[in-house]
Image: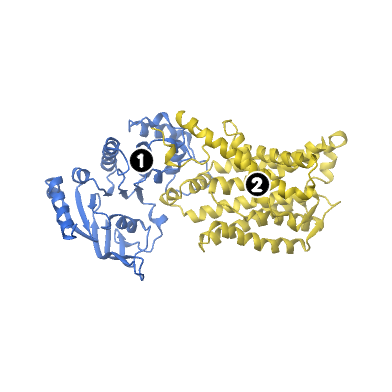
Amino acid sequence: MLELRNIQKFYNRGTVNETCIFDDFNLRIEEGEFVSVVGSNGSGKTTMLNIICGSIPIDRGSVMIDGNDITGQREYVRNRIIGRVYQNPSSGVCPSMNIIENMAIADNKGSSYGLGRCINKQRIEYYRSLLSDLNLGLEDKMHIPVGSLSGGQRQALSLVMSTLKPLQFLILDEHTAALDPKTAEVIMELTDKIVREKHVTTIMVTHNLKYAVEYGNRLIMMHEGHAIMDLNGEVKKNTGVDDILGKFYEISIERGN
Amino acid sequence: MTLLLSVFEQGMIYSIMALGIYITYKILDFPDLTVDGSFPMGAAIAAAMISRDMNPVLALLTACVAGAAAGICTGVIHVKFKVRDLLAGIIMMTALYTVHLCIAGKANLPIYGKSTIFENGPVDALFAGSLRPFKTVVIIFLVTMILKYLLDWYLSTKSGFILRAVGDNDTIVTSMGVDKGTVKIVGLAISNALVTMSGCLFAQQQRFYDASMGPGTMVIGLASVIIGMSLLRKVSFIRLTSSVVIGSIIYKGCVAVAIKLGMPSAFLKLITAVLFLAILIVSMERSAKAKPAAQSAGGNGSGNPDGDSDAKVVE
């Protein structure tokens, strides 16, 4: 269970450019939920993910996991139980290393990176079988530097790498936004499959309302630092893209644009 | 013959330093100027200890530890105090000038006639008669190979992989639950340990320490790394560390030829700089030419030295 309590977050505090992203923001995500988060630019979606992962400091409030306060925990410590896939497909992989090397790094997550050999030859077949399940041809490119793969292939690899070891939370930060529609579809299906298989609590930020409606069992719409819509279970199932879009226009009109 | 031997001797001694620069410049993507201070520090340690008749191997180990400490200092300045990489190096380089002067006690300390790694009882007994001229080069070769293989081994470990990852994409290091700052500090420590050992061997081979040994170290190392990488890029079975060693020997050869052709030795640094510039221009032209070719070939480049740009993506 993940809880954000009374979060307050300013950017450029104390300057003329001061912007308040969150003032007393609360959110509770139960174990096993697959939450889709939508909202306009600047509504605080990515900031929320950064706060959960500890990438940025907060001005007030606390982040709790299973009742433990982790507000002060460093980002790299929190990342031991969190897998994150970024919008930029290059962020989740090492471009100059090949697929095996990338997988080997991910396969050691959670243990100490000591002086043992990193590539375990017995695991290579396992990596290959994981990648051939994706049907992207990655299993034939195991020795090619990841930098020369396509964006979709890299994103699929990032997804597999971030979920290779047991994890408590999967954070998806607009992870299909940089891909073409067809590849995005493939990555979304892959995401759904992985989330189901691993029963991992997932938070997905997306600008694609169709994905937000289609996938996951909870939908949150953010606006000016608040969750103005929070749909669960049956209600979420019966909600269509048009309903969400209607709400979207409503808030846009409020803002006068 | 003597010229060739001295090219190999000095080329290989400098190649140890170049391996250190390879770690910071190529793997960590950190322009580390500390080396201009840690190289003469190694020389000062050698001169100070050997002039007091201490064991030359002990001097090498001391240099290794001192170099690692210097690297850690640079790393801590950069990581913990958030000083920019270039400035952190400059600060340490300047500080180390005083350190190596203090270690040596004076600006020039000769150690002629003392026993060094190359000049001691057992070694002289082993290389008797006609083998004698090859004594130094053989010992340097052994030391260089040991250090090169140690580095190769390290880079294949988990710790080595994380080191490679931090220069490539440090986001991933954080997502693996590892503190990227610590990884950088470790990299700088290993790099400067190698550079200082190289300086220590250099002083033992030249049989003196001089305070002015430092400036230009970085350039020599960079030139060696870039020569090795760009000349041997296509030869996929040669490890990158080996190409750095070969690059360093080629570089020393070029300098030796320039001096042989009548350049006064006072021009050494100028030759170094001009040569480095020439190498940079040539290697940039090569990579510009190589890029379209690599794209059409589906990016099979084994080296792919500066490859993270999205422009290289091949569908």
A62 relative position to B133: left or right: left
> Residue drawn 69% across and 61% down?
B97
Q: Where residue A5 appears, x then y in whole percent?
A: 27, 64
Give the vertical position of B222 relative to A70 (above or below): above
Of tags 1 and 2, the one toward the viewer is: 2
Chain whose colour in the figure is yellow: B
Is residue B92 depicted above or below A233 in this figure? Answer: below
Q: Dividing the image into 4 quarters, which one contains the C terminus of chain A? A: bottom left
Residue named by callout 2 = B221
Label 2: element kind: helix
Indicate the quadrant where residue B150 lies.
Answer: top right
Q: Decide: marks 1, 2 in contact (CB < 8 A)?
A: no
Q: In the rendered image, which quarter is residue B130 located in?
A: top right
Q: Where in the figure is residue B202, as x and y percent of width and height?
A: 75, 49
Q: Would you call the spot at circle 2 few (<14 residues within 10 Å), some (14-19), or many (20 or more)?
A: many
Output the chain of dot 2. B
**Residue drawn at the location 62% of the way across and 48% of the way down:** B20
